[in-house]
Amino acid sequence: MLLETNRSLSGWRRCRDIFLRQPIWFQAALVLGAGLRLYFVLFTPGTCDVAIWRQHAERINEIGLIGYYHENPLANHPPLMSEVGALLLRLAKFSGIPFRILFRLPFAAMDAGALALLRSLLRDDPKRRLLAAAYWLNPLAVLFSAYHGNTDSAVAFSALLAVWFLSKDRVAAGAIAVGIGLGIKLPVILALPALVFWLAGWRKRFEFIGITALTALVTGLPAILTDAHVVCANVFGYHGQQLHSTGGIPVWGWFRVLVRDGAWVGVPLEEIPKPLTFLFDHSWQIAIGLLLIMTWRRRSQRSVGQVCATIAAGYTLVYGFSDSWAFQYFAWSVPFWFFLPDRFWVPATLLAGGYIYSLYWFVCGNPLLLGEWDFTGHPQWPAIVMLFRDLAVLFFLISAGWFFVQSFLPLRSAKPMPAIPDLGENKE
């Protein structure tokens, strides 16, 4: 016991010493980012997702996970995270700590882990502190990890952790990180192609895929053994929703925002050119197909920074071309934005951050986000929110198209990236 206490104190001293060695401006950024996350976790009610997760947890505790999957086809979270949510509700009732705090606190802490991983992967970039601070204070990172009340921040963390392990040639550890991530939220699978192509040789690739699949399977094994059909139908059959306000205002989507509410406003659907409606009807399949093609085209870009940039570009393709959307989906990739040029992550932060924050402020009626979330009670949105939305949709659509086209162009000298050794010779 004494030895464990000494080790704990030693760890805290090392963290303190590392903190004190940082420039004062970076210390201030770290304290401010941590304070913002604690504020949102402790004092704000969060979005309706907090209430939805509480409902999930209540019913799982009452009728069991499989029973709840049968009862609610929209219960689409993997078995591991569903059971964790139910456990957190039991802990909330036992301890008296509100569920909204217990549910969001782990993801705020996970975001601190993402910051540490990001700074480690950027360690040879001369702007590493600036980029790390820009992430830690990014309004999207803050809101989605500590305010919103869903699990999407775990996607970026597990993908970053996998990159960190693979950069040290720890294939099994990287695969386990992705597998556990899949047990929390499935969209981490969108980073899988870039990670697989990064590995040298098919033996390592098959090892990585196999351990990832086995880990993901183990995280949901009791539920899968009980009723694999309903687990697959609920979890793997979910592809997002085309969300809109109660007044019909779309939350996201190039077709619904730029076509139906833009160039073809008021035009009957049957009069819109068939190629556009075909792209809309199959938007998520097209987005995944483009992601796979782009990732394959970039497979020779093998530094840590280039692989992280490929992951960021892949998620951007999904944001740009898919109309199936929820607010918090930006959380899947925000840390990876900082491996792309400044001309991407700066406007992406301003436009997407402006959209999310202004909408949340409007919906809860409070600039500090202290009000109760009332999405259904706000059918019409103010012009500033819709302007941010339209510009963000347009920006990600253009960026997605550019990333895809760029993957077919000759590779030019890129900005300096972390000089972490390659994982071996490319044996394509």
Image (cartoon, helix red, strand yellow):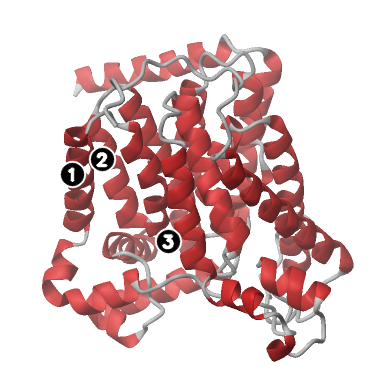
Instruction: Kindly indicate whether the residue at mark 1 contacts the one at mark 2 (C-beta within 8 angstroms).
Output: yes
Position of residue 72 measured from the top left corner of the image (x, y, whole percent): 37, 84
* Above or below, 378 relative to 186: below
Distance, label 2 to label 3, CA atoms, is 37 Å
> Mark 1 or mark 3: which comes first in sequence?
3
Residue 42 visible in the current orientation: no
Q: Residues within 10 Å of mark 1 (few under 14, many from 20)?
A: many
Q: Nearer the viewer, residue 66 or 253?
A: 253
* Above or below, 72 relative to 329: below
* Above or below, 395 relative to 100: above
Quadrant of the image occupied by residue 381 = bottom right
Describe the element under mark 1 as helix, strand or loop. Answer: helix
Extreme residue toward the right, this view? 383
Distance, label 2 to label 1, CA atoms, is 6 Å
| Residue beneath the point at 17% across and 46% down | 210
Distance, label 1 to label 3, CA atoms, is 39 Å
Position of residue 1 measured from the top left corner of the image (x, y, whole percent): 19, 24
For this view, does 217 lie left or right of residue 342? left
Q: Residues within 10 Å of mark 3 (few under 14, many from 20)?
A: few
Q: Which residue is denoted by mark 2 in the rendering?
A: 175
Instruction: Kindly indicate whether the residue at mark 3 contacts the one at mark 2 (C-beta within 8 angstroms).
Output: no
Quadrant of the image occupied by residue 405 = top right
Describe the element under mark 2 as helix, strand or loop. Answer: helix
| Image mark for residue 211 | 1
Q: Amino acid at mark 2?
A: Ala
| Residue beneath the point at 76% across and 68% down | 258
Q: Amino acid at mark 3?
A: Gly
Quadrant of the image occupied by residue 67 = bottom left
Task: Name the mark nearer the viewer: 2 or 3.
Answer: 2
> Mark 2 or mark 3: which comes first in sequence?
3
For this view, does 350 lie left or right of residue 39? right
Describe the element under mark 3 as helix, strand or loop. Answer: loop
